[in-house]
Image (spheres, rainbow, N blue to C red):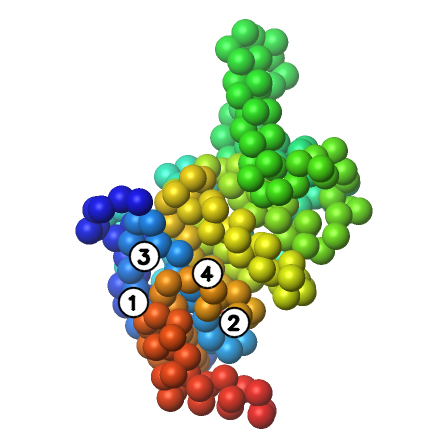
Amino acid sequence: MSTSSQPMLAVQGLCKTFGGLKAVQDISFDIMPGELVGLIGPNGAGKTTCFNLITGFYKPDGGRVLFCGEEITGKAPHTLARRGLVRSFQKTNVLRALTAFENVLAGHYLAARQSLMDIFLPRAHVRHTEQKVRESAASIIDIMGLSHRINTPASVLSCGELRLLEVAVALAAKPRLLMLDEPAAGLNSQEARVFGQILQRLLGTHVESMVIVEHNMHLMMEICRRLVVMNFGQKLTEGTPEAVQRHPQVIEAYLGKASA
Ligand SMILES: Nc1ncnc2c1ncn2[C@@H]1O[C@H](COP(=O)(O)OP(=O)(O)O)[C@@H](O)[C@H]1O
Ligand SMILES: [Mg+2]
């Protein structure tokens, strides 16, 4: 874990309006090196929009984003991915006809565009690179606990295995900061527990920091040291899971949603 006091990610006063809807209003938070932070809040709170603003899929109406001290506001997603800011999507990035291994391999080539062309050219350094990529893909499959499924088509993987493969594909881009949007959707409590343990293992080995949006509160409480809570586009509070759980406005936001 780094002792640097500079945030890996600094989100400062981000705003985004869609028509008349203030989807994200003056959102600020920092992610420090070595941290795993949860971004939580009821449906429609603005979590995915925040991810889209940070990772360059949307341009903010106001505010800025700094990555490792450098302003990156509005930069293109592929530029940011190359710098190490990588996000997953709520919808799967897995190609179902490919095997687990091929999916992770494809992730590597997509992350380093020119290599995709290079593999057709029989040059020695390219063969060397291809070997390295294959080793990297195998090691990612291994850390995600999918070695026994390495040559299985994604189409026949279980829901839990697919969720693990989605993270594996994101890891192929060699993130420094990995942002996961609802990575544990559809998992039962046992699968979610295993999934959480694997995510924790990635921290400090495959990624420096992580931000996770997730509805499974039990999982978030277990793996995150800090939670940022959003509601109606605004930041309600941030703090340890214990503090956040006791926060009256957080309780109201969740109970309000449950009784709606
Ligand atoms: N591209 C878009 N165009 C218009 N409205 C959007 C768009 N993306 C999100 N919204 C709206 O912004 C609000 C926040 O959405 P979102 O960020 O997806 O919430 P969350 O991920 O917390 O469930 C919602 O009311 C949603 O309908
Ligand atoms: Mg969302």
Residue 100 vs residue 107, the one in the foreground? 100
- Few, some or many C-alpha atoms within 10 Å of disc 3 (few <14, some 14-19, many ≥20)? many
- Residue with the mark numbered 2: 217
**Real-space CA distance between mark 1 and mark 3, rounded to the nearest whole angstrom:** 10 Å
| Amino acid tagged 4 | Ile
**Real-space CA distance between mark 4 and mark 1, rounded to the nearest whole angstrom:** 22 Å
Q: Is residue 76 visible?
A: no
Q: Position of residue 36 (x, y in %)?
A: 40, 56
Q: Are marks 4 and 1 in contact (CB under 8 Å)?
A: no
Identify the element where label 4 is drawn: helix
**Real-space CA distance between mark 2 and mark 4, rounded to the nearest whole angstrom:** 10 Å
- Few, some or many C-alpha atoms within 10 Å of disc 4 (few <14, some 14-19, many ≥20)? some
Q: Are marks 3 and 2 in contact (CB under 8 Å)?
A: no
User: Measuring 53% from the left and 21% from the top, which residue is drawn there?
Assistant: 132
Left or right, residue 223 beside residue 185: left
| Amino acid tagged 3 | Ile
The vertical placement of 166 against 244, above or below, is: above
**Which of the two discs, 4 and 1, sits closer to the camera?**
4
Q: Can you say which quadrant of the picture contains the N terminus?
A: top left
- Residue with the mark numbered 3: 31
- Residue with the mark numbered 4: 223
- Few, some or many C-alpha atoms within 10 Å of disc 2 (few <14, some 14-19, many ≥20)? few
**Real-space CA distance between mark 1 and mark 2, rounded to the nearest whole angstrom:** 22 Å
Which residue ends up furthest to the left in the rendered image?
Answer: 5
Sequence-wise, the earlier of marks 2 and 4 is: 2
- Disc 2 under 8 Å from ligand 1? The reply is no
User: Measuring 60% from the left and 60% from the top, which residue is drawn there?
Assistant: 192
**Which of the two discs, 3 and 4, sits closer to the camera?**
4
Sequence-wise, the earlier of marks 3 and 4 is: 3
Q: Position of residue 166 (x, y in %)?
A: 61, 48
| Amino acid tagged 1 | Ser
Sequence-wise, the earlier of marks 3 and 2 is: 3
